[in-house]
Image (tube, helix red, strand yellow):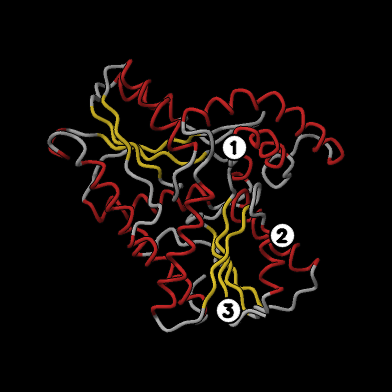
């Protein structure tokens, strides 16, 4: 039995750790009806298999261009190690685990390990600052199912969101300032700022999903902190035959170029870790698009293991443990 009784599980979607794992990763993703419903329930997995087969080749090429795999698993592991160290500096006795929704280490496997280690209190901390049923909600449901399957009696506290946490806002502000410094004269050189968030099926928003409102609240807090008056918001990474939140990031870049914008900083507003959406879509696809339009594009760094972000996660855990805001 593990010597600690309290634990944290960092939740994320995961990413393929090789080009060979791209197809099964996509299958797992499209099999999740909490993200997208592909017809009646009995057609979900057959259609997911078909879509994964059709998209695997193109997706594999994206991953080849960023080193042959997603760094998400590695980064999340380092985040977990840093968070565990930070929490235990406070005199705690925490273990921090990693659970992924669509790739290894799967949430169910992490829950089994946590249960086997005798954990009695678990804090579920999603690496999605803004809540959506497609991300946080899906991970929470999988965690609940896994615990029920093991007939676990441990107490689970679910951190719903932290989109306006002061230290999270401070961390974002630091990355934006660093991004602006990559232009010759910083903000004085007329740099426009584009916040790019992961797209969400529009039906979710229409049904009351708070994701877009929380993204806008995050942007409001960080732009107020930095004194930024003008900015744009767009959405990227659409997949599947449904209507998605808009405007789309590529189209927004084209529109900004048409308006005369020459210097653009893209801020990954709903991504806390580097993965294919930052390393391929932003750093390769969007920069090439901007170059062709006569625009210089830079990206604000992802939060990854930025010390103030790890400190934010630690404070969120402590607040949740004490029965504070979750």
Q: Position of residue 207 (x, y in %)?
A: 64, 48
Q: Badge 3 is on which residue?
A: 6
Circle 3 Cα neighbour tier, 10 Å, few/some/many (<14 / 14–19 / ≥20): many
- The answer to whether the residues at label 1 and label 3 have Cβ atoms under 8 Å apart is no
Q: Position of residue 275 (x, y in %)?
A: 48, 41
Q: Residue at x 57, y 71 (%)?
A: 123
- The answer to whether the residues at label 2 and label 1 have Cβ atoms under 8 Å apart is no
Q: Residue at x 70, y 37 (%)?
A: 24
> Which disc is residue 108 wearing?
2
SS of the residue under disc 3:
strand
Q: Residue at x 53, y 31 (%)?
A: 63
Relative to the observer, which residue lies in front, 113 or 148? 113
Q: Badge 1 is on which residue?
A: 18
Q: Quadrant of residue 56?
A: top right
Q: Residue furthest right?
A: 42
SS of the residue under disc 2:
helix
Above or below, comparing residue 261 to residue 228 in the picture: above
Q: For the residues carrying marks 2 and 1, which lies nearer the camera in this image?
A: 1
Q: Position of residue 50 (x, y in %)?
A: 76, 27
Q: Residue at x 67, y 58 (%)?
A: 107
**Circle nearer the N terminus (2, 1):** 1
Q: Position of residue 251 (x, y in %)?
A: 43, 24
Quadrant placement of the N terminus: bottom right
**Circle nearer the N terminus (1, 3):** 3
* Spatial separation of the CA atoms under disc 2 and disc 1: 21 Å
**Circle nearer the N terminus (2, 3):** 3
Circle 2 Cα neighbour tier, 10 Å, few/some/many (<14 / 14–19 / ≥20): many
SS of the residue under disc 1:
loop
- The answer to whether the residues at label 2 and label 3 have Cβ atoms under 8 Å apart is no
* Spatial separation of the CA atoms under disc 1 and disc 3: 33 Å
* Spatial separation of the CA atoms under disc 2 and disc 3: 18 Å
Left or right: 99 in relation to 175: right
């Amino acid at each position: 039995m593990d010597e600690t009784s309290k634990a944290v599980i960092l939740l994320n979607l995961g990413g393929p750790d090789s080009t060979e794992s791209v197809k099964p990763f996509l299958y797992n993703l499209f099999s999740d009806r909490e993200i997208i419903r592909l017809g009646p329930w009995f057609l979900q997995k057959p259609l997911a298999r078909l879509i994964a087969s059709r998209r695997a080749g193109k997706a594999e090429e994206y991953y080849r261009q960023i080193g042959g795999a997603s760094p998400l698993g590695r980064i999340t592991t380092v985040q977990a190690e840093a968070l565990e160290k930070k929490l235990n500096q406070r005199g705690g006795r925490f273990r921090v685990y990693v659970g992924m929704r669509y790739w290894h280490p799967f949430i169910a496997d992490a829950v089994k390990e946590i249960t086997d280690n005798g954990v009695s209190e678990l804090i579920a901390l999603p690496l999605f600052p803004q809540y959506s049923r497609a991300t946080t909600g899906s991970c929470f449901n999988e965690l609940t199912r896994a615990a029920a399957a093991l007939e676990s009696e441990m107490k689970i506290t679910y951190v719903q969101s932290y989109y306006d946490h002061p230290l999270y806002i401070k961390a974002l502000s630091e990355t934006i300032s660093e991004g602006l410094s990559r232009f010759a004269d910083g903000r004085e050189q007329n740099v426009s700022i584009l916040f790019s968030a992961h797209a969400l099926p529009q039906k979710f928003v229409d049904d009351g999903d708070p994701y877009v409102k929380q993204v806008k609240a995050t942007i409001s807090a960080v732009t107020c902190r930095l004194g930024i008056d003008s900015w744009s918001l767009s959405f990227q990474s659409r997949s599947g035959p449904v209507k998605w939140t808009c405007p789309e990031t590529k189209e927004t870049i084209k529109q900004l170029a048409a308006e005369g914008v020459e210097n653009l900083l893209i801020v990954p507003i709903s991504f806390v870790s580097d993965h294919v959406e930052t390393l391929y879509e932003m750093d390769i696809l969007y920069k090439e698009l901007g170059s062709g339009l006569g625009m210089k594009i830079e990206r604000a760094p992802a939060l990854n293991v930025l010390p103030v972000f790890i400190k934010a996660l630690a404070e969120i855990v402590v607040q949740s443990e004490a029965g504070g805001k979750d």
